[in-house]
């Protein structure tokens, strides 16, 4: 990842360190950036020459001696009209050069900004999708969407309208300052001294802007989070008539957001207003001191005209600098927020030393839990000292009251979470020593609510892997899904809407079975996989499962105990501990927790 992880940093060095975090992206586009910087020199020189040329024209009209100073000595040998024509042509030439160079530079800088924005967004997406599920448990999705969209866009502004533009403005001010001192040092000193207090004032306003902008973006994240939550849960919102309540909550956060945005507007406007007043005071100062010098014959009208234009030109880059600095501050706020995500550690990583995996992919499918403890929060263990073995080809059911830890076992086995203590072995290998892709290639997990992506039916079975259409059809036939798919309007090419809303719950679950079957896993995990199916569809799946479970290790979680009577072994959990183990008949004979749960369900039926 291009953003290097860094410890908590003092506020004073934040901007510099944030800027350094962008350096790798700048290096990737170094050629375009170099060309942008090359254009700065002739553009700044052309901009500085324009007041000088106008001043020389005034001096020439008044026949002042300064009109013929270096490098305009050639004007002595030409008539007044020819001299004015030459100066006019030179002025037009500098304008055209500056326009052409500014246009080229603007295009290059915008191009670089868009490229960097795309690269950062890709890196951020890649990093977010690599984070452990634990991170998403505590982070609202709406806030992540804000980081991936508006924050990244603001970050790109650092390059597209900010950083290069600031360098351009600073270079232009430097060139103007040098030329001013070479022309008339007293007036030059006056203008430079006026820059010092105004620069300090701008820095103060920008710091206040930065803090307000950060708070505004936090409120925008809250807005997006509320919006995402309400759109996903729109059914519950409408069924329980929460439209008014949620609308009031959204309106409240929206007002807080507007309040923070107003503060950013206030400080941004304060910078512009300050510069307007200071530039007018600078021009008045030049006219006042310049008039006094003219009376003493220490200055002529042409030079005074040049400095009046210099006063304007000197503060124009400063004004643009302030505007770009605002964009940079907003961008740095975005960098800070994006960095918080990019610096989030990836808890679950592949082993550094690559393990040799047999090319034939043949594995036995043995699962072993050795003294496994697990807590979502520190010291609040949901699994305690689990120690059991599931032999190759064995069909095992996990049973227990709600909150017993059944689903947590599956999450640990698939390595969505890491055990707090102990280890999990797959065919004698600690799953932390297996690449995640290899671990998940060996198993398929079918959840109660199968998630479908936007796309056609076929792509929702293959999930981007290179399976042939014949293999897709074979998987559908194996799981008794083919007939239902063929009844869809375009069969396997039927487009599915977001989350598969144009399919029934049963149809979505059937696709999940086909998705598992095509991968031919050695371990199959069913987490309430048939709970949402009607009787007819469940009968089709049960028939398909008989074929799918052959020669495979299987773990089944089911609340309806009647559906697991035929498994080889049942593991009974209570408050994260394994309290019973045996077949259906053995556990009934023991008269323990399993027998109580079974009799209770019989009474309910």
Image (tube, grey):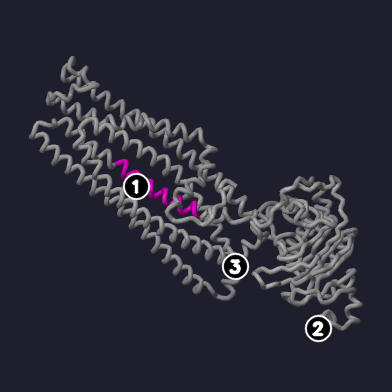
Q: Which mark is residue 71?
A: none
The spot of residue 466 in percent (x, y) is: 76, 45
Q: Residue 499, relative to residue 20: is it above or below?
A: below
- In this figure, which residue is indicated by the disc labeled 1? 322
Range shown magenta: 316-336
Left or right position of 153 against 299: right
Asked if one can make out residue 407 in the rendered structure from this viewpoint, the answer is no
Instruction: Mark 2 or mark 3: name the one nearer the start of the chain.
Output: 3
User: Could you tell me which quadrant the C terminus lies in?
Assistant: bottom right
Asked whether residue 405 is drawn in magenta, I would say no
Alpha carbon distance from label 2 to label 1: 73 Å
Contact, CB < 8 Å: mark 1 with mark 3?
no
Question: Which residue is pictured at 46% across the width and 58% down the height?
Answer: 217
Up/down of 246 relative to 83, above or below: below
Residue identifier under label 3 = 233
Residue beneath disc 2: 600
Return the residue nearer the eye: 318 or 16.
16
Judge from the rendering whether residue 246 lies leftward or rightward of residue 425; answer left or right.
left
User: Disc 2 or 1, which lies upstream in sequence?
Assistant: 1
| Residue in the picture at 30% in, 48% down | 199
Is 359 located above or below residue 233 in the figure? above
Who comes first in sequence, dot 1 or dot 3? Answer: 3
């Amino acid at each position: 990842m291009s953003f290097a992880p860094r410890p908590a940093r003092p506020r004073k060095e934040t901007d510099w360190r944030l800027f350094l975090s962008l350096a790798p992206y700048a290096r990737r586009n170094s050629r375009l950036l170099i060309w942008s910087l090359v254009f700065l020199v002739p553009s700044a020189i052309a901009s500085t020459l324009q007041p000088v040329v106008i001043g020389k024209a005034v001096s020439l009209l008044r026949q002042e001696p300064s009109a013929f100073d270096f490098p305009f000595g050639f004007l002595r040998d030409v008539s007044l009209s020819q001299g004015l024509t030459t100066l006019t042509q030179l002025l037009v030439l500098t304008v055209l050069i500056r326009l052409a160079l500014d246009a080229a530079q603007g295009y290059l800088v915008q191009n670089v900004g868009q490229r960097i924005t795309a690269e950062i967004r890709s890196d951020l997406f890649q990093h977010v999708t690599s984070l452990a599920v634990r991170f998403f448990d505590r982070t609202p999705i709406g806030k992540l969407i804000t980081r991936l969209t508006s924050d990244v866009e603001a970050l790109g502004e650092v390059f597209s309208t900010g950083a290069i533009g600031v360098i351009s403005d600073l270079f232009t001010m430097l060139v103007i300052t040098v030329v001013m001192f070479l022309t008339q040092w007293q007036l030059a000193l006056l203008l430079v001294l006026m820059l010092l207090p105004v620069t300090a004032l701008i820095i103060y306003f920008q710091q206040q802007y930065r803090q307000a902008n950060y708070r505004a973006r936090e409120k925008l994240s809250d807005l997006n989070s509320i919006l995402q939550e309400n759109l996903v849960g729109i059914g519950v919102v409408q069924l329980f008539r929460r439209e008014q309540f949620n609308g009031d909550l959204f309106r409240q956060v929206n007002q807080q957001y507007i309040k923070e945005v107003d503060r950013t507007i206030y400080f941004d406007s304060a910078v512009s207003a300050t510069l307007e007043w200071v530039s007018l005071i600078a021009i008045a100062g030049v006219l006042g001191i310049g008039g006094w010098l003219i009376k003493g014959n220490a200055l002529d009208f042409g030079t005074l005209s040049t400095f009046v234009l210099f006063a304007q030109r000197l503060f124009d880059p400063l004004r643009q600098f302030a505007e770009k600095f605002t964009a940079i501050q907003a961008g740095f706020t975005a960098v800070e927020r994006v960095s918080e995500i990019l610096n989030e550690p990836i808890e679950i990583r592949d082993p550094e030393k690559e393990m040799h995996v047999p090319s034939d992919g043949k594995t036995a499918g043995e699962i072993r839990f050795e003294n496994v403890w697990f807590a979502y929060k520190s010291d609040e263990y949901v699994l305690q000292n689990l120690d059991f073995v599931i032999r190759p080809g064995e069909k095992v059911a996990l049973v227990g009251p709600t909150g017993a830890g059944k689903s947590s076992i599956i999450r640990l086995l698939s390595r969505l979470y890491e055990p707090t203590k102990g280890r999990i072995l797959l065919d004698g290998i600690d799953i932390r020593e297996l690449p995640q892709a290899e671990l998940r290639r060996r198993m398929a997990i079918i959840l109660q609510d199968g998630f479908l992506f936007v796309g056609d039916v076929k792509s929702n079975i293959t999930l981007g892997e290179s399976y042939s259409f014949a293999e897709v059809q074979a998987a559908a036939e194996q799981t008794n899904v083919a007939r239902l798919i063929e009844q869809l309007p375009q069969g396997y090419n039927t487009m599915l809407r977001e989350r598969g809303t144009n399919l029934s719950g049963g149809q979505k679950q059937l696709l999940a079975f086909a998705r598992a079957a095509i991968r031919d896993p050695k371990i199959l995990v069913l987490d309430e996989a048939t709970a949402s199916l009607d009787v007819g569809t469940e009968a089709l799946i049960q028939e398909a499962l008989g074929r799918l479970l052959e020669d495979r290790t299987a773990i089944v979680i089911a609340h309806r105990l009647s559906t697991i009577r035929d498994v080889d072994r049942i593991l009974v959990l209570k408050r994260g501990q394994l309290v019973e183990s045996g077949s259906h008949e053995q556990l009934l004979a023991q008269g323990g927790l399993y027998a109580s749960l079974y009799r209770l369900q019989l009474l309910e039926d």
